[in-house]
Image: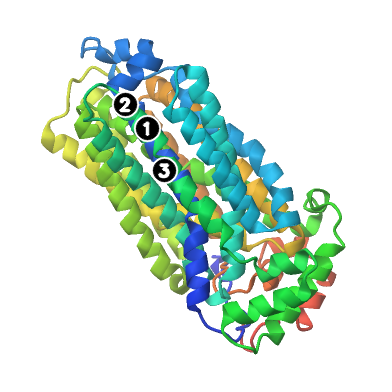
Amino acid sequence: MAGGAIVNSGSGKEYPGKLTLYVLVTCVVAATGGLIFGYDIGISGGVTSMDSFLEKFFPEVHRKQQADRSTNQYCQFDSQLLQTFTSSLYLAALVASFFASGVTRAFGRKWSMFGGGVTFLVGAALNGAAKDVAMLIIGRILLGIGVGFANQSVPVYLSEMAPARLRGMLNIGFQLMITIGILAANLINYGTNKIKGGWGWRVSLALAAVPAAIITVGSLFLPDTPNSLLERGFPERAQRMLRRIRGTDDVGAEYADLVAASEESKLVENPWANILQRRYRPQITMALLIPFFQQLTGINVIMFYAPVLFRTLGFGSNASLMSSVITGLVNVFATFVSIFTVDRLGRRKLFLEGGAQMIVCQIVVGTLIAIKFGTSGDGGDLSKGYAAIVVLFICVYVAGFAWSWGPLGWLVPSEIFPLEIRSAGQSINVSVNMLFTFAIAQAFLTMLCHMKFGLFYFFAGWVVIMSFFVFFFLPETKNVPIEEMVLVWRKHWFWGRFIAADDVNGVEMGIGKPKSGDK
């Protein structure tokens, strides 16, 4: 087996320094940018299962859902307009991420976060006050712009601020905040659904302003990363900031590496043209395929539409919202597993274990639904015991995602790009993520109607494919300084053919030279 040629040691030069309180606080504040993304993922599925919301904006769906229970369960919520409400945000985020790349490179990561927070605030106000579907979708588009800016800048900021040996843990703070946002939204939906008078959905949508305000205000107090300061021509400030975030004056080696990377980045006038060069083939492949695969795990079937999905399975309105709260809790706690293991076990092991867990659970859930509803969708409501088994396996599936493809889908792309193309690379990552998030959100209810229980087998098949991809083509990146990452690709059995010796000479001659004994 070629395994020995596939796995890299994942270790690199260790710079002096420690995890300072200053870095920990700034990373926690920056990671709150994930709250707006998570809150939106959780809130949209909840409000679209509320009768009062459907009756006001999507009366056709409401009539179908209230019809005789013998109606095909799989097709109750099939509506292009309803799916457009959910998916419009992600199309806007896709476009916004390209503009965010220029802002992030020219003005720094924090101002991209600030712009995202402000735009999200305006979108939340419009959604909470919405009078018609057009107003809802305009608000969603503004929310999407905010998400595009935040998702482009936050993972890069975290990867640049963190010490190499703890980069995984601190970067996954972003995913943790996403899961907390989802859980908060699920809890709020559960509460607002009980409000008399049918206006609870307004509270749910308007409260998106809270996470938006947190990142907007928080970003104003964030320092620039040393990498960004060097990129924008402030070497003295960069060196002072590096001393502060590492908690030591002995930063000469790391600073020299950053300067070398910055000098190379200044030779690149157009990162969008350079990113297509042969030597960046490994990184661009990962930036395209990792977010593509992340969405085809099927997680957003659960996170966007959990209440709708549970109602389709025969749960009542409150029961479906409570079930999504349970999966939200699992999501949060399982993310902590990744936080505490990613820098010890590495990225590859978590990807592969999580993938195996998701495959098994999707096959089981699909089979349980097939037994109950068959292909006709006429099966009535689930018994409590049967429903509990379905929720259990969905929770195990969510846990597998939460410590693998969830956090690592953001972590790995943010840590593999050299400085000269980092902003452009992250924009591609976010754009592909949003494109396929949009596609899944726009198509899921229709796919459920037509593919029925086979939809779960469809996503399980994709998880098999992505697990093979990780096994053969993704090298281990734990504990490797960002500016040294080219050595990982150079040593890889497949990607090494795309990287010439000249592309790594500077690194091997002192820019992040590996420790003796590293293979």
**Label 1 belongs to which residue?**
45
Residue lying at 43% horizontally and 62% vertically, measured from the top left: 350
- Apparent side of residue 229 relative to residue 366 in the rendered image (left or right): right
- Residue 29 in sight here: yes
- Apparent side of residue 122 relative to residue 388 in the rendered image (left or right): right
Residue lying at 27% horizontally and 43% vertically, measured from the top left: 325
Amino acid on which disc 1 is placed? Gly
User: Does the CB distance between marks 2 and 3 fall below 8 Å?
Assistant: no
**Residue 255, picture quadrant:** bottom right
**Label 2 belongs to which residue?**
49
**Residue 292, picture quadrant:** top right
Amino acid on which disc 2 is placed? Ser
Residue lying at 17% horizontally and 24% vertically, measured from the top left: 381
* Label 3 secondary element: helix
* Label 1 secondary element: helix
> Label 2 vs label 3: CA separation?
16 Å
State the residue in front, 172 or 296.
172
Q: Measured along the vertical axis of the image, is residue 464 above or below residue 318? A: below
Residue 39 badge = 3
Number of numbered callouts drawn: 3
Q: Measured along the vertical axis of the image, is residue 502 above or below residue 473? A: below
Image quarter in which the N terminus is found: bottom right
- Apparent side of residue 198 relative to residue 93 in the rendered image (left or right): left
Residue 491 location in percent, x, y?
68, 71
User: Does the CB distance between marks 2 and 1 fall below 8 Å?
Assistant: yes
Residue 445 location in percent, x, y?
41, 24
Image quarter in which the C terminus is found: bottom right
State the residue in front, 455 or 69.
69
